[in-house]
Image (cartoon, rainbow, N blue to C red):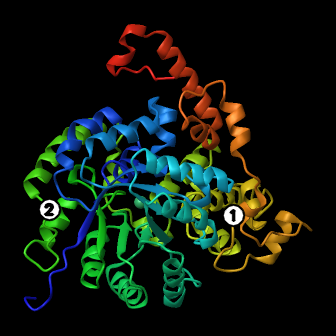
Amino acid sequence: MAEIAKKPVKIVETVLRDAHQSLIATRMKTEQMLPIIDKMDQVGYHSVECWGGATFDAPLRFLKEDPWDRLRLLKKGFKKTKLQMLFRGQNILGYNHYADDVVEYFVQKSIANGIDIIRIFDCLNDLRNLQTAVSATKKEKGHAQIALCYTLGDAYTMDYWTDIAKRIEDMGADSLCIKDMAGLLEPYAAQELVGALKATVSLPIDLHTHYTSGLASMTYLKAVEAGCDIIDCASSPFALGSSQPSTDVMVETFRGTPYDTGLNQDIMTEICDYFSPLRDEAIKSGLLNPKVLGVDIQALRYQIPGGMLSNLISQLKEAGKEDKLREVLEEVPRVRKDFGEPPLVTPSSQIVGVQAVFNVIAGERYKIIPKESKKILMGEFGQTAEPFNPEVQKKAIGDETPITCRPADLIPPELPKFEKEVARWKQQDEDVLTYALFPKVAEEYFEYREAQQTHIDPSAADKGNKAYPV
Ligand code: CO
């Protein structure tokens, strides 16, 4: 390999976002992150993914933490390393489409509070749903990375991927991410896909996958050999299973080769030593189920993300129909086909999963059609890669005319309304965005925050405790 020019592979460290979202239901607290970020800042990662995805919803709902506070504290600690977040296009960090003014303001505030790189995706790969977030990111001088959601199916040919990559480049993306949320990208397929994308676009390519099906490190190896520029990895104690491949293993794999990352392995070992007891604690408390650490062969057979599988199981449990899991897993691909064969990722994974459960437990397909299924078949989430099954669509929406425009074109500006509603609680500009995304959870949190403040000695307010400047 001596004749190959040096091409160090870059590493995105995910331990502060996807790794704990995938393994311990996003329950890592800010106070558990802060003691190690000075060390992490010295490693030389391409970026640290630490915000977005479920790390907005979960702290508010379960940890009674303000996600904006977390971001500001991380930014203070990471002096050199770029901070990265995951952003669901027009859904922002929620589950519905929002008006453009909310999307733009969210991007503006994310960057103002410390985010450098925004990874933006849409669950249908409908690029119209990304344009507002991408333009806002560019306007705020952030790095706009557009992610295509990787999936398998009739529609997803190599032509589909190269065509979408070209359009992503034309949209002004700074880099392109292959987002393989279910761990479906096999090593040789990755080699072929990355090779084809590199031949089509000149953007840096970042590969994001999960270890769920046991393939991921091999997939990274072949992808890097094919020209992949950036790989997403997690510090070993929070790697593997439904999380990412281990940073330490990948760095070691490429050491002494043209792809040598050049990262400081001594500091990385100290980082592992820091996270190891947190992992042990999580296993002991039951927060980390050892089951998710192994290879989940169902992921390859049924091609569904790990989170979706656990949702299906809990829905069936609630209905007392746990014995129907096999039937539901077989129904999922049929529903997916009826719904235009979308990738299965939040929120399409939930919609397809819930419909499949109803189809099985009602004893008749589409006897029950939830509101979210109707929305997808009305075109309210955007355009799918394949057409809908016309019979199913008719059953769901009757004679209504589905929309074909970009869904957010039909949503008038929403910020003024949210500003009015949040006025009673507002202590910082960002509160309106928290409220816009999760009104109920936000109100509960704001109420908690106020109660905390009234119990605090006012003379201590400027000593960095929980009191917020008004
Ligand atoms: Co992921």
Q: Quadrant of residue 192?
A: bottom left
- Residue 156 screen position, x and y as percent: 54, 83
Above or below for 78 versus 435:
below
Describe residue 358's horizontal placement relative to residue 239 as left or right.
right
255 vs 287, nearest the viewer: 255
- Looking at marks 2 and 1 on the same chain, the residue that comes earlier in the sequence is marked by 2
SS of the residue under disc 1: loop
**Can you tell which of label 2 and label 1 is closer to the viewer?**
2
Residue reaching furthest to the right: 399
Q: Quadrant of residue 279?
A: top left
Residue name at image x 63 percent, y 78 percent: 385
Q: Is mark 2 within 8 Å of ligand 1?
A: no
- Residue 16 screen position, x and y as percent: 33, 47
Write down the residue under mark 1.
381
Amino acid type of the residue tagged 1 in the rendering:
Phe
- Residue 95 screen position, x and y as percent: 62, 52
- Residue 394 screen position, x and y as percent: 85, 70
How far is disc 2 from disc 1 in space, using C-alphas? 41 Å
Q: Which quarter of the rendered image does ligand 1 occupy?
A: bottom left
Q: Is mark 1 within 8 Å of ligand 1?
A: no
Residue name at image x 61 percent, y 62 percent: 348
Amino acid type of the residue tagged 2 in the rendering:
Leu
Write down the residue under mark 2.
263
259 vs 168, nearest the viewer: 168
Above or below for 462 versus 219:
above
